[in-house]
Amino acid sequence: KVPQPPTITHQSPKDYIIDPRENIIIHCEAKGKPHPSFSWTRNGTHFDIDQDSNVIMRPHSGTLVVDISREKAEHYEGVYQCTARNKHGTAVSNNIVVRQSRSPLWSKEKIKPIVVQEGVSLVLPCRPPAGLPPPIIFWMDNNFQRLPQSSRVSQSLNGDLYFSNVLREDSRNDYICYARFPHTQTIQQKQPITVKVLNLDAINDTMAAFYNDTDLFSEDPMDERRPTFLIPSGSSSSKMVLRGQVLEMECIAGGLPTPEISWTKVSGDLPAKRTSFLHYQKTLRIVNVSESDAGDYRCTARNRLGSVHHTIRVAVKAAPYWISGPSRNLVLAPGENGVLTCRASGTPKPSITWAMNGIPIENSPNDVSRKVEDDTIIFTDVQIGSSAVYQCNVSNDYGYLLSNAFVNVLSEPPRVLTPANKVYQVIKNHPALIDCASFGSPIPKITWFKDSRSSTLDGEPYIKHDNGTLEIHIAQAEHSGKYTCVARNILGIYENHIYLEVKEPTRILKQPEYKVVQRGKSVVFECKVKHDPSLIPTMTWLKDDGELPDDERLIVDSDSLTINDVTENDAGVYTCIMNTTLDHDSASAELTVVEKPDPPTDLELTDKKKRSVQLTWTPGDEHNSPIKKFLIQYEDSLHNRGHWHNLTEVPGTKTTAHLKLSPYVHYTFRVLALNAMGFSRPSFPSKVYKTEAAAPDENPTGVQGFGTEHDNLVISWKPLSGLQSNGPGLHYRVMWRQKAVDSEWTTVTVANNSKFVVSGTPTFVPYEIKVQAVNDHGAGPDPAIAIGYSGEDFPVAAPENVQAVVLNSTLAEVHWDPVPHRLVRGHLKGYKVTYWRKNNIHKHNPYHTEKLFLVFSGNHSHGMLPGLHPFTLYSVNVRVFNGKGDGPVSSDQHFETPEGVPGAPTSLVVTNSNQDSLTLEWSPPHDHNGRITGYTLKYQPVNNSNELGPVEELALLANETSVTLPNLKYSTRYKFYLNAKTVRGAGPAISQETVTIMDEARPASPFGNLSSSVGEHGALISWEYWGSGKTIYVEYIVKNSEEEWQKEPVNGSQNVTLKGLKGGLSYRVRLVAKGHHDQPLHHSEELLVTVPAVASRQVDIATQGWFIGLMCAIALLILILLIICFIQRNKGGKYPVKEKEDAHTDPEFQPMKEDDCTFVEYSDNEDHKPLKGSRTPSNGTVKREDSDDSLVDYGEGGDGQFNEDGSFIGQYSGKSASRDTAEGHESSEAPSPITAMNSLNSFV
């Protein structure tokens, strides 16, 4: 154990006020090696604890416990000082002044009532008894209620109650001053003070009875007066305050009206952050006073009659205070130097005295290594045995400071006190502090290394503190690792290993979001977090900064909070907190629960008038979603009971509506509220409000007149609704007269209808029409006049002066004179133009009569004819039409279109292709569009990369239809372009491609590099092709067979796999290219492909005679069964399709001939319909052709038709004998028995 002089660690305060009702405890704790012993002095002399049975000292401590049960506490008042000593020195405590708290009673006194004149100033003295500590003063009444204070009435710092001016209401008999003594928690009460405030007349009346009606106060009542200070007195005063304490200054003024108080500092500004104003600006309070607060302060009292000032001069004194803290302990090695300092200040300047081990230093043994210089002791070349505790005492008139500091002379090798292999964990980008607490004498020097110890850690990013701690200001992942702390002095070296782990910070990646949810639904708050995987996270959810309610509706998952069946109580702020052992992160979001509003209530009708009423209501709860509007509906129980109609809407901020009403309606109202969630339920209906009947306010709308025949006029209108009728007995007064004719109105009355027919009118004449609404209470307003027309008739005249103007070869414009309006005899709808090709000038075809129509709406007099054929004779006529129909046709007019460019030649064919020449033949264009003046032929070679060569051009005569091109390159593909010409130019071209042949003996083939390979999936045929034909297919046939070539189409590729080739056979294979329909087929060279036979030779059972016979017998038996079934059917028996399908599972089964075992069609010449119970195809028809093929064809992949239940339609189809005969001549080749047997095998 390292020797150490004593050090005081805990002691009671210098001014120690005790509660006399409790035991006295005077603290004194100290440490040292060895542990120190304790002793006490009382009032400057030794306090023998053993001689006082009421006093004990706690074990291993210097704390005194005084039992006051047998002795009064005041017996132990005094000045105590504790001494702690061991063999290395002595430490002493402060002088502890022990005093018991006191709360004396108020002296008994009789306080006379105070009678004052209204408006004067008044002071109610408190003068509480002196206590320890001083009491807290406040004023209350008999009911223990604090008396109200204001700028007029307030309490001073000494506890007195000041009235700037008194009022009549200040009269009372219970002004009571209370003193609360905080140490003993007792309250003392002063006798109540009675105050009576009277005006001057009341005082005279009261005193006249005692003084023979003499007027006691002859002066006038108290008038307003200037402010005067009640406290402090005079124009100036002074105040002293200690540094660090609280400065309180007050100015209370009297006056009428009540003065206002303000404060200023004469020699500077008030310290804003430390200044406050209390008691309605009457008290200036400055906390933590410093020397700069000294100076003159001025308070000003002001009312409208004037002002008064008072200056307070403040002096700031200071009890001693440390400048750089108390003296620090020194640990020195033999031969080292050191300094003890005791830097303190105060006002006035304090004196400093030193002591060693509690003895004044001047009385201590002399030590050559020690030198005292005022506030400093200098140690030079200290030696073992000179350890001691030094006391520094700094004092002035206002207090003292006492500090203990030891000088410990030791010779110790270094030791690191931080535990070995300690692991520090920090969060990335946070500071890291790695401790290396050490001890040694001389003081060890600390050096830090990391991992390989290649160099010391000094400089960025490392900071080494004086106590050995290594700091990394911003820790990063690369700073993790093993650190070595080395402590060394002249006596040795000590190493310690410490580990630093830098962790990834905890971050909320997806924060919960603000939610607005409807009541009863679910809501999910997401809180996705990223954290260091080595740290164990803990997710916590809070609601309104408190714990979540214990409710099964709240489901907490690893990264979310789900609230089911949300209620309004769930609204609030939800916070997710992710905690680890090193850090945490949190995020919050608010939940607002909304719902459709509650229905409005308390519907009331006011301000009732004939045509209006005022409706008011009380809104229901809006459930956190503001009401946007109110919808007011009504029910008319007179005309439409049970049906509610929308009447009006008002903004959501209003709760009243002025409703306009109609006469003769029994109204009931209800109100609905709308917010963002939707409409509320309707309110309860209001009372019924009945409006009186009246004449109609309006007439029918939509009045119109038209004719359905050429001699009538139909007048129609939109009838009024029951709400618009305004009363019973609604009918209509219909009036009409011919326009532009001075005639009287004809009037009829119509009820329960909305139209009236006037007969015998002239054709298409304008009429003025009026319809007026009338009920039992009168007629509606004068109706407006509508214009209508009687019925139309067909037009009687055709347009005249029809002319056609040709604009170009495909466009002409037609003009005509409009038909007069009177001859149209109706509403003019427009003109119809009919035009057609009379004949083509070139073809001379007079029978082409396809007619085209164009309609020009409205009153047109011309129109365009687009899309005409060039070089053609056209006819055109025009007619007018109205609402009734078409009028007569004008006379036909003729016009010719000029020539245009011709169409493309009809065909272009290559013939007589030789090695270096070929012949082109073509047909003229179908559409000449003029006279053909010649042809232009262009051609150019094309290589295997489809690149075009130079173009050759050849002009040909109009009567030529072929041309031979010599001197061409052999075996070369050419592309040809041919177009025709007229005087208007060349038309579009037709193109063709071909290849010149290799030699004259044999045509050149467009195929090359033909090859084959046989695999398990079939034979792969590959080739190259450069021909012009687009349709290519592969043909193959068994070698030495006379069957037809089998075809396999090729879809634009240059290889194909032939499947289904039989093993052990050789096939001839070739490629065929099909060009234009007039061109010959191009074949490639033949290729011989041999398919290997299967390894194990098997006999095909289908080729055995006995098997063929057996199959024929089975087929015959099945045929007999089918005949029996048909006989039963003809007798009326039913033949379900299901049973037939069970008996004949193969849809391809058909009857079989007995002589050669081949399959034929079953024929029933009398009935070509499907069997009863069978299903027809989805299109409802049965095609005979679908069943005319043999079973061999079906076996080879022919297309058979099946109905919806899977049965084959062909077996039910019949055909005529003539058809059989005809088809028999078409097919002379017998079907393959092998194929038939294979098909029959599948059936069996």
Image (cartoon, helix red, strand yellow):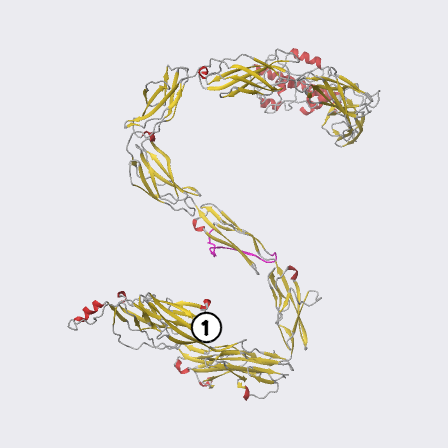
Is 521 in the magenta? no
Numbered disc 1: secondary structure: helix
Q: Can I make out residue 989 in this image?
A: yes
Judge the density around disc 1: few (<14), some (14-19), many (≥20) Cα neighbours within 10 Å: many
Image x and y of residue 205, in percent: 18, 68
Q: Position of residue 1134 (x, y in %)?
A: 56, 19
Compared to residue 80, the image places residue 684 above or below, namely above
Could you tell me how many numbered marks the image carries?
A: 1
Kindly report the secondary structure that dominates the magenta region of the rendered protein.
loop
- Using the image as rendered, state which of residue 874 and residue 112 is in the foreground: 874
Residue 164 visible to an observer of this rendering: no
The magenta segment is: 532-551
Left or right: where 784 falls relative to 975: left
| Residue 64 at x, y percent in the picture | 46, 80
Asked where in the image residue 139 lies, by quadrant, the reply is bottom left
Q: Height in image: 322 above or below 1222?
A: below
**Residue where numbered disc 1 is placed:** 293
Residue at image x 45%, y 51%? Answer: 571
Q: Was residue 540 drawn as part of the magenta stretch in this picture?
A: yes
Camera-nearest residue between 440 and 664:
664
Q: Does 573 appear above or below 867? A: below
